[in-house]
């Protein structure tokens, strides 16, 4: 386990690009960034690619993404000429689930939805993170109340690595300004009321005043709508 407090000291006061450079040096060859091609992730992908920071960029290809998401994926690779590594679900697990329960079982119960997320997202994520020591994400504090209690640097006990959120303190206006400044391609669904974009069957636009993640798994009555990708232990919760 890396000394997370030492890492926190190394990046303290650094802007996101400087912090990413520092972490890429500390965790050389063992640092990755996960993108789902939303606003925040496009900002971080640009930081990594435009500055030639040696961080592997990957995405979870669930097989149920929006056409607009595939466009942004392809355009980003065209612009930077660098790979974005795709991790797919294990086909046998998908086939077994669909053969047994049908292609839309996730609508029927929370248990079924979590099963689908587990097969299409969690298992591929574990493979993508295997052998790495640091995971970069696009999480921001203002996205939802349960994320406000997080830190920009965390220990992920489930995956046994450090997580860093380089634009954690940014507002959505900061994100949009960066995208405009560098003319970065972004998912046009954002302009149509989709602040959070996941799988097509599980994502809808949100109405004014609704929570950031109200459009994710909207048929479920839950206070915290997370698929399990970002379960972690807070920096302050770590024992000496």
Image: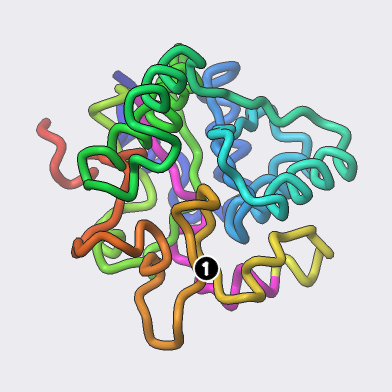
Task: Give the quadrant of the N terminus.
Answer: top left
Q: How is the image coloured?
A: rainbow
Foreground pick, 173 / 1: 173
- Residue drawn at the location 23% of the way across and 28% of the way down: 157
Q: Quadrant of residue 141?
A: bottom left
Residue 163 lies within the magenta run: yes
- Residue drawn at the location 30% of the way across and 22% of the way down: 160
Classify mark 1: residues with Cα within 10 Å, few (<14), some (14-19) or many (20+).
many
Looking at the picture, does residue 212 appear above or below residue 94? below
Q: Which residues are magenta?
A: 161-177
- Residue drawn at the location 15% of the way across and 36% of the way down: 238
Task: Give the quadrant of the C terminus.
Answer: top left
Q: Quadrant of residue 213?
A: bottom left
Looking at the picture, does residue 1 appear above or below residue 185? above
Which residue is the extreme one toward the left?
Answer: 239
Q: Could you say where residue 174 lies in the image, as x and y percent from the top left?
A: 60, 73
């Amino acid at each position: 386990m890396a000394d997370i407090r030492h890492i926190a000291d190394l990046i303290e006061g650094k802007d996101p690009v400087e912090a990413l450079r520092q972490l890429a040096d500390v965790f050389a060859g063992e640092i990755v960034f996960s993108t789902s091609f939303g606003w925040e992730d496009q900002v971080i992908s640009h930081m990594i690619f435009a500055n030639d920071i040696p961080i592997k960029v990957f995405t979870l290809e669930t097989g149920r993404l929006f056409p607009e998401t595939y466009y942004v994926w392809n355009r980003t690779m065209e612009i930077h000429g660098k790979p974005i590594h795709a991790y797919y679900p294990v086909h046998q697990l998908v086939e077994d689930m669909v053969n047994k329960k049908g292609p839309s079982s996730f609508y029927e119960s929370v248990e079924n939805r979590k099963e689908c997320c587990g097969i299409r997202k969690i298992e591929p994520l574990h493979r993508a993170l295997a052998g790495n020591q640091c995971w970069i994400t696009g999480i921001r504090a203002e996205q939802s109340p349960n994320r406000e209690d997080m830190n920009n640097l965390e220990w992920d006990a489930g995956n046994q690595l450090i997580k860093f959120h380089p634009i954690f303190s940014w507002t959505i206006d900061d994100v949009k300004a960066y995208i405009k400044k560098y003319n970065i391609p972004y998912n046009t669904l954002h302009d149509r009321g989709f602040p959070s974009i996941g799988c097509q069957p599980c994502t809808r636009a949100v109405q004014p005043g609704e929570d950031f993640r109200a459009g994710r798994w909207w048929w479920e009555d839950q206070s915290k709508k997370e698929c399990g990708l970002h379960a972690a232990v807070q920096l302050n919760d770590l024992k000496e």
